[in-house]
Image: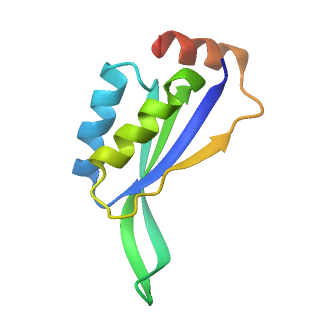
Amino acid sequence: MKPVIIISTYPNKKSISKFANQLVKSKIVACVNISKILSIYAWKGKVENSSEYLAIFKTITKNKTILKKKIKETHPYDVPEVVEIDVTSIDKFYFKWLVESTT
């Protein structure tokens, strides 16, 4: 069992807050950090500057497939960002909490 971080961006706080609460309650994730950000990206031939909310989902390997599936199923964007970050180091006490919160 290993820690996993998945990131995605959302158009508004409402669209991620409800989803994040459901994921924590169902123990798919231990935590979701949500931050307002400015995203600059190419979309349909134009450069966009948009306010978005960055969601950092913290979970373990056994939950990552279901988490990615749920993000894609519920996401309001046509092409949602679903990026997995490889965790190579984690504090042992934080990892213990992560496991306990997702099992």
Instruction: Point out the residue furthest to the bottom here.
Output: 45
Q: Against 80, is 90 above or below? A: above
Query: On the picture, is 85 further left or further right than 51?
Result: right
Which image quadrant is residue 94 in? top right
Q: Quadrant of the N terminus?
A: top right
Give whichever of 15, 60 is nearer the camera: 60
> What's the coloring here?
rainbow
Rendered location of residue 70, percent (x, y): 35, 38
Task: Name the residue located 36 percent from the left edge and 68 percent from the top edge.
Answer: 51
Task: Name the residue located 59 percent from the left edge and 44 percent from the top edge.
Answer: 84
Rendered location of residue 95, percent (x, y): 64, 18
Total residue callouts: 0
Which image quadrant is residue 29 in? top left
Task: Name the residue located 43 percent from the left edge and 51 percent from the top edge.
Answer: 35
Rendered location of residue 79, percent (x, y): 39, 63
Give whichever of 55, 83 is nearer the camera: 83
Instruction: Point out the residue furthest to the right here.
Output: 88
Q: Against 75, is 79 above or below? A: below
Task: Name the residue located 49 percent from the left edge and 25 percent from the top edge.
Answer: 63
